[in-house]
């Protein structure tokens, strides 16, 4: 069964990585970057402080930090050394001869689970749990999905790495939201009747994507 799943994972990776174009190379490389999403992260912080009392807003920030910390430490420091699954782009992996690389980027040695997937899905799930807003939640999930697709396109992760990262992010977000809920009960925080300006992260994110599409 493991051999079959590994073969299926490999074929899926090669199918995604094998679809090439100069435009897609630039777009996917940019989409996979962390720094380019800073404006969207800032806009998320804005809506948090815009809609919550400062004590709750600080709790939200701590919950986001705990989600990312959980994803990074469990994924990179515990699971990766135990599993030791090489990235498809790793030169010591025989499949690397079939994998197309963009801008010479091969990533680290091991890739299971994907911390990119864990972090993006962790943040997305946490935003979903906190705000329960359809537009914002759908955009965040789409953002996480395209980020995962970009990692496979760039040849640095198998789809299985990304799926495991998504599950890790979900667990981290659920645990952080549980702690956040306990904190809100402790300080007797009330939920706003309606949330304001939740469209702003969506607009900022879409403008970022449009900018990448144009410059790619």
Image (cartoon, helix red, strand yellow):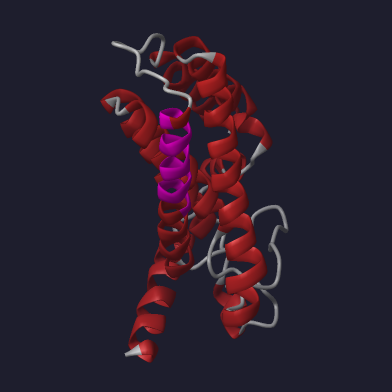
| Residue 164 placement (x, y as % from top left) | 44, 65
Is residue 2 left or right of 187 when viewed as pictured? left
Query: Residue at position x 55%, y 70% from top?
Result: 112
- Using the image as rendered, state which of residue 1 and residue 30 is in the foreground: 1
For the N terminus, which image quadrant?
bottom left
Query: Residue at position x 50%, y 44% from top?
Result: 120
**Residue 177 belongs to the span the image colors magenta:** yes
Image: magenta residue range: 172-185
For the C terminus, which image quadrant?
top right
Q: Quadrant of residue 192?
A: top left
- Using the image as rendered, state which of residue 51 and residue 103 is in the foreground: 51
Whether residue 89 is visible here, answered yes or no, is no
Q: Quadrant of residue 102?
A: bottom right
- Using the image as rendered, state which of residue 37 and residue 213 is in the foreground: 37
Q: Quadrant of residue 27?
A: top right
150 to 180, vertically: above or below: below
């Amino acid at each position: 069964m493991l051999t079959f799943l590994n073969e299926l994972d490999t074929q899926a990776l090669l199918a995604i990585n094998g679809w090439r174009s100069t435009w897609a190379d630039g777009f996917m490389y940019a989409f996979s970057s962390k720094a380019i999403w800073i404006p969207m992260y800032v806009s998320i912080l804005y809506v948090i402080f815009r809609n919550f009392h400062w004590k709750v807003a600080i709790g939200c920030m701590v919950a986001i930090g705990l989600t990312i910390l959980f994803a990074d430490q469990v994924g990179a420091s515990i699971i990766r050394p135990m599993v030791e699954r090489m990235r498809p782009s790793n030169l010591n992996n025989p499949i690397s001869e079939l994998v197309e690389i963009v801008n010479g980027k091969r990533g680290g040695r091991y890739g299971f689970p994907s911390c990119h997937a864990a972090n993006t899905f962790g943040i997305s799930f946490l935003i979903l749990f906190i705000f329960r807003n359809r537009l914002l939640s759908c955009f965040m999930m789409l953002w996480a999905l395209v980020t995962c697709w970009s990692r496979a396109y760039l040849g640095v992760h198998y789809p299985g790495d990304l799926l495991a990262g998504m599950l890790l992010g979900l667990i981290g977000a659920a645990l952080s939201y549980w702690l956040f809920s306990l904190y809100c009960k402790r300080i007797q925080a009330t939920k706003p009747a309606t949330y304001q300006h939740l469209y702003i992260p969506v607009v900022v994110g879409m403008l970022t994507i449009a900018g990448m599409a144009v410059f790619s």
